[in-house]
Amino acid sequence: MIKTIHQPFDEQLGSILSRMLRSGSYTNFTAVTAFAKNSGVLRLMPALKSFKQDHGGRLCFFIGVDLGGTSYEALLSLLEIADELAVIHTEDQVQQSFHPKLYSFFGGPNAAVIIGSNNLTAGGLWHNFESAVLLSSEDGDVNPAFIQQNISAYLSSLSSLGPAYWPIKTAADVERLLNNGYVSKEIALQLRSRSAASRPSVGKKLFKKLFGGGLHTSIPPLEQLTQSAADNNAEPLPLLKVYADAGEQTLWMESRSLTGGSRNIIDLSMQARIVKSCELQLDFTASPAVFMQGAVEFFGIEPEKTAERRDITLNFNGVDYIGNTILFPAGSKANGTWRLQVKGVSEAGVKITDAFRALGEEHYLTDKIISFTKIEPDHYTLSVSPLSKLEYFKACSRIVALNGHSPLSKLMGLF
């Protein structure tokens, strides 16, 4: 079978890979990509685990680190599941970018390979405009031995690159890449992208937009809400809906001091008072205040349903910690706001609070910026940044708000 895949007009490549990984038709899966991010890796992770655990499959990944396209967390996540993981990077006088995008399956009677433009990221596998070709032995059009021999020869060529080929054996190897600037944490990549997108340029506002939107938008447009909050005679503005139903979105919050024995309980507001927005033509310093959805709705909970209780998974430094509870406390512990108890446990039985302590701070989350990126409902990545970067976070955010009604509330933002 020979098939072209034009995403998003045809089926998304991430869905095709998930289906093939779960099919039981193959015993070896190899991904060779220029970029890898947790946004793609974690969305594919259930199928990767099924391939390995349910079908005894072998997983191999060969990843590039050029152009800031691969994240620290993605490599840690792949290390958790991979039978073989390597990074490829050249530092000759004329640097060559490692830029392939290849996914192969073989073992048993069948073999298949997908070659195209799709990186191991959410955009590459689901959202972006991408094209690829699938060659499969399923209908007898392609000899499975040809696919397997061709891919095996290519992988041998990669492993023979000497110092440009670097196997990743432990988390310390990934840490070394981070410390030497070859990869960055995902929140840093997002901030860099937002900073570049929002950086003003001379005469930029003089030009007219020439292009329309794509097939869908992950963040609902807010331009139609242009009423001035300074007009006290105007009808009160509705609570602004700012969270996307689908797609990747990051919420960050200033922590300051926290409650709980491990200082691991985070307040989640029912409403948030907007401080600034790059999208809304509003005066947020005037009265009455303009409010948006509170932090609790980012996690898919309606704030009025205070009897609800939900456990979410947080991926921290490439490891999933299950059982972090969002609840609205009652009785003597109530403070009138929702809370997120960061208390999950990994499949290996490690508490996330112990993982925090292993980083050298007894109360790791206090006086920090805590960021959550939505992977799918009830599954988020967790990043922790120093409070010294607060102004940078504010500058890169499309909306900045107070995590509550009070002017003294902690800051939060969205990008």
Image: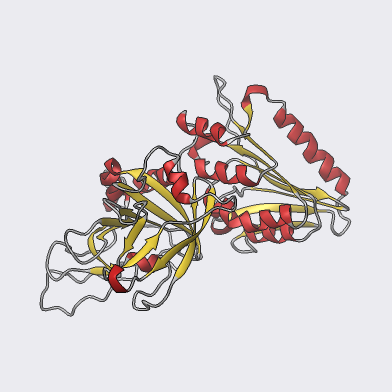
* Screen quadrant of the C terminus: bottom left
Name the image quarter holding residue 284.
Answer: bottom left
Residue lying furthest top: 93
Residue name at image x 67 percent, y 53 percent: 48
Q: x, y percentage for residue 101?
A: 65, 44
State the scheme by which the image is colored.
secondary structure
Q: x, y percentage for residue 13?
A: 64, 57
Q: Answer with left or right where residue 85 lies relative to residue 267.
A: right
Q: x, y percentage for residue 330?
A: 32, 73
Q: Give the total of numbered labels.
A: 0
The one nearer the camera, 284 or 171, is: 171
Q: Answer with left or right where residue 284 lies relative to residue 113.
A: left
Residue name at image x 82 percent, y 45 percent: 147
The one nearer the camera, 362 or 28, is: 362
Q: x, y percentage for residue 187?
A: 41, 46
Q: Answer with left or right where residue 50 lies relative to residue 245.
A: right
Residue name at image x 48 percent, y 38 percent: 68
Q: Answer with left or right where residue 264 lies relative to residue 283.
A: right
Q: Is residue 386 visible?
A: yes
Name the image quarter holding residue 20.
Answer: bottom right
Q: Is residue 201 visible?
A: no
Name the image quarter holding residue 294.
Answer: bottom left
Position of residue 149 relative to residue 286, above or below, is above
Residue name at image x 61 percent, y 39 percent: 63
Position of residue 270 relative to residue 61, above or below, is below
Position of residue 155 relative to residue 267, above or below, is above
* Screen quadrant of the N terminus: bottom right
